Structure formats: structure tokens, C-alpha cells
Image (tube, rainbow, N blue to C red):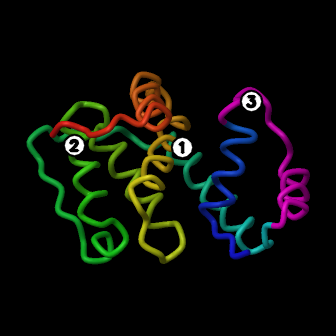
């Protein structure tokens, strides 16, 4: 079975961060468990690097530009299809994401493997990013309900 970095992140998020947010298992124990679960060492290492970069982003200044428009690069368009880009714009226009959180989400998507990402995977990346950031509880709850309650359609 081919596992990628996103699969490792999902496993970690579902088993450690989401349910047990206050537990901080050591990295070596997690690496051993991930290996026993069948994840390849290179993907595990990349997943930890991804999480380290996400953790480091907590200290970046928040940027606000209410009148700015986001233009996606060619590489971002290859990774995020029109539906994903539209969803990010919708979340920002709805006030769920700030410009800074949007940029962090795009950064974390681009740091994943070189494959395009679908809307469901994007929602999980958004959830992971919001979970990791201070003062994002309301946005996190909104995204969590969106993922788990699966409304039929979003009105744009």
C-alpha cells in the first residue's frame, strides 16, 4: 500500500492531536508506532518536518490586508484545483480564514507531496492548521462541523 505524507499526518492528527490534544508523546515513540503501522520512514520524516514547520508558524506575525486579492501561482493552481481555490476564497470572504491563515494553509499544502490535493484533503489541512494556531478556536469549530456534518452544498 502506497502511503504518503498526508496519510501519516491524518494518522497522527486522528490518533494523537485531535482527540488527545494535551498529550505530548515523544517523537521516537511515535516514529516506532508509525513504522509498526506500516508507514515508510521517509514519509514519517517528511510528516514530522511538515508539523515542525507548522509549529514554527505560530510565531509569525499576523498580516491583514482587507482589500488585497490573492493571485495563485501556476504551481499552486496545479496542486489546488479550481474547487479548492474557490473554497479558500469562500472561507476568507466568509471571515473564517484570515489572509495569514490562508497563506499558511497554502504553504502547508505546497509542502505536501507533489500530487494535486482534493477538496476533502484540503479541508483536513485547513483543520490541522487552524488547530495548531492560537486564537483560531471559532474557525476550527466551524471547519470541524463542516467536515463531520458534511452539508450538502455550500452557498456562495
- Secondary structure category for the residue under label 2: helix
Image coords of residue 25 (percent x, y):
84, 40
Q: Quadrant of the N terminus?
A: bottom right
Image coords of residue 104 (percent x, y):
41, 51
**Residue at mark 2 to residue at mark 1: CA–CA distance:** 18 Å
**Residue at mark 1 to residue at mark 3: CA–CA distance:** 14 Å
Read off the residue under disc 3: 20
Q: Quadrant of the C terminus?
A: top left
Mark 3 or 2, nearer chain start: 3
Mark 2 or 1, nearer chain start: 2
Read off the residue under disc 1: 128
Q: Which mark is residue 90?
A: 2
Q: Are marks 3 and 2 in contact (CB under 8 Å)?
A: no
Is 12 magenta? The answer is no
Number of other residues with Cα within 10 Å of mark 3, as a class: few under 14, some 14 to 19, many 20 or more = few
- Secondary structure category for the residue under label 1: helix
- Residue at (26% x, 58% y) in the render: 83
The stretch in magenta equals: 18-38
Is 33 magenta? The answer is yes
Q: Give the vertical position of 126 relative to 35 (above or below).
A: above
Amino acid at each position: 500500500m502506497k502511503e504518503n505524507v498526508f496519510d501519516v499526518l491524518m494518522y497522527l492528527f486522528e490518533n494523537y492531536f485531535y482527540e488527545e490534544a494535551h498529550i505530548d508523546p515523544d517523537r521516537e515513540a511515535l516514529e516506532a508506532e508509525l513504522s509498526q503501522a506500516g508507514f515508510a520512514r521517509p514519509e514519517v520524516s517528511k510528516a514530522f518536518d511538515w508539523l515542525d514547520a507548522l509549529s514554527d508558524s505560530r510565531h509569525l506575525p499576523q498580516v491583514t490586508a482587507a482589500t488585497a486579492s490573492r493571485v495563485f501561482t501556476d504551481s499552486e493552481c496545479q496542486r489546488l484545483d479550481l474547487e479548492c481555490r474557490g473554497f479558500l476564497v469562500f472561507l476568507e470572504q466568509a471571515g473564517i480564514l484570515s489572509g495569514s491563515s490562508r497563506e499558511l494553509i497554502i504553504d502547508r499544502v505546497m509542502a505536501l507531496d507533489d500530487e494535486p490535493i482534493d477538496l476533502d484533503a484540503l479541508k483536513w489541512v485547513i483543520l490541522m492548521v487552524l488547530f495548531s494556531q492560537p486564537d483560531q478556536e471559532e474557525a476550527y469549530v466551524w471547519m470541524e462541523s463542516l467536515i463531520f456534518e458534511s452539508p450538502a452544498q455550500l452557498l456562495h
